[in-house]
Amino acid sequence: MRCLFVADLHYALPQFDWLLQVGPGYDLVVLAGDCLDVGSIVDFSAQTLVVRKYLQRLAAATQLIVCSGNHDLDSRGEDGEKVPRWIEDIRGLGIKTDGDSVVVGDTLFTVCPWWDGPIVRERLIRQLETDAQRRDGLRWVWIHHAPPRNSPTSWSGSRSMGDADVEAWIAQFGPDIVVAGHIHQSPFVRDGSWADRVGKTWVFNAGHQFGAPPAHIVLDTDADEAVWISAMGIQAVDLDGPLVRPIPPLTSVPDWFDVKRTA
Ligand SMILES: [Fe+2]
């Protein structure tokens, strides 16, 4: 299975255009939070309409997973906690979203919500506990906008801006892979990275760059290899091997990589 991971598109329409163009070439596309941008001059409800259209078209062509990020909270729930109602609504388009867990091939994907208060946080913990019971024999992947604290994937350049809960949950549950975003600069700053290994768990954060294509990660579950493509160049890690730092740049893409998909 070939998966495409992006996050933090922040209503950058050229990046959504790119995603529509290349996404159908993948077995699975993941947007790990912050499709929208609270700082945009475009009205929030207009953003949700436009992004929904993009996602609808993409979901018609391939399997699509979208989790919420802190920029995606457009409403308040009955309990007063901020929630991404528009993301709840795209579930009807066949898209796996917050609170969903789905098995694709030999991989269990747990789609985690951005939580603004104790109710959604507790719901997420229950989801992780439930999925921990069914992970046997499967590769377990979390889609969670915030990367863990104390990881190069959450390094701002001067301090860790990662999530302490995610750090603790990784230690508790030991998923195979966590796909995150949120800290835009981590892959691009000194001592930061797009990839990390926390215990046996691989953590990815493609980072955010302007223009198309967005920084992105391609995971090939057959080759057990992940490739990061950004304005900084191309790097790859072998998920079966140890993480070597600094991750050396690739002079050519791996044999399994179809360059046309990202052209
Ligand atoms: Fe973001």
Image (cartoon, rainbow, N blue to C red):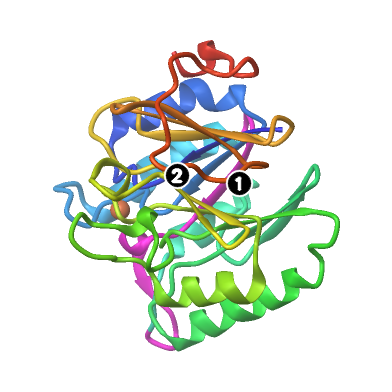
Q: Is residue 199 above or below residue 25?
A: below
User: In this view of the protein, which residue sits in the foreground, 170 or 133?
Assistant: 170
For residue 30, which numbered disc appears in the image?
A: none
Instruction: Give the percent coordinates (x, y) of residue 218.
Output: 54, 32
Q: Which image quarter is the N terminus in?
A: top right
Residue located beneath label 1 in the image: 93
User: In this view of the protein, which residue sits in the foreground, 198 or 48?
Assistant: 198
For marks 1 and 2 on the same chain, the one whose residue lies earlier in the sequence: 2
Type of amino acid at the residue the image marks with label 1: Leu
Q: Residue at x 62, y 77 (%)?
A: 172
Local SS, label 1: helix
Local SS, label 2: helix
Instruction: Give the percent coordinates (x, y) of residue 237.
Output: 54, 36
Q: Residue at x 85, y 55 (%)?
A: 137
Type of amino acid at the residue the image marks with label 2: Arg
Q: Which residues are magenta?
A: 60-80
